[in-house]
Image (spheres, helix red, strand yellow):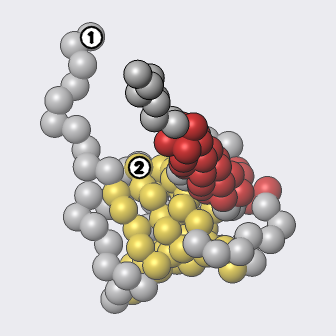
Amino acid sequence: MEQPQTPYVAPRRTRFIVGAVVIAVVLVGLVVWAMARPGAASMYMTPTEVGDMVLLDGEIRMSGTVVPGSIETTGLATSFLVTDGTSEVPVTTDSPMPDAFMDSSEVVAIGSLDGDSFVATRVLAKCPSKFKAKA
């Protein structure tokens, strides 16, 4: 009487290991690619970071507070200063401003740096909170 032969499992195990290695390499590659992009490590830049840069290429997201009394509007063209408490960057835009945009509001300007001025294609304003913490 002959012994039944056990199935050979090495090809199945090898395919599983190769598949796992391919998936791991792809995931590591995606993370490295994403982190290598400019500004990938931080969602927004501050006015100080933008002012310290010599040459910025591509779209930038700058977050800060509108300097009170700096808003000037002519039709759709709006200019204002954004600060982080340390430095100020002038911002100009031709896009419509959100309703929550006003003096001392927190804003995110999306655009590019043109010399010393930031040219925004979009401006987002944080809505003021209706709720305040108990003192």
- Quadrant position of residue 47: bottom right
Q: Which of disc 2 and disc 1 is earlier in sequence?
A: 2
Mark 2: amino acid = Glu
Q: Quadrant of the C terminus?
A: top left
Report the front residue among 60 and 84.
60
Q: Position of residue 85 (x, y in %)?
A: 61, 41
Q: Which residue is mark 2?
A: 106
The circle on residue 100 is none
Residue at the left extreme, as displayed: 130
SS of the residue under disc 1: loop
Q: Nearer the viewer, mark 1 or mark 2?
A: 2
Q: Is residue 11 left or right of residue 121?
A: right
Report the front residue among 33 and 91.
33
Q: Which residue is mark 1?
A: 135
| Res 114 visible | yes
Report the front residue among 1 and 20.
1
Q: Position of residue 102 (x, y in %)?
A: 33, 58
- Quadrant position of residue 95: bottom left
* Residue located at (48% from left, 50% from top): 65
* Residue located at (57% from left, 37% from top): 10
Residue at the right extreme, as displayed: 54
* Residue located at (69% from left, 80% from top): 114
Report the front residue among 122 and 9.
9
> In the figure, 105 relative to 109: above or below?
above
* Residue located at (50% from left, 42% from top): 12
Within-10-Å neighbours for mark 2: few <14, some 14–19, many 20+: many
Residue at the top extreme, as displayed: 135
| Res 24 visible | no
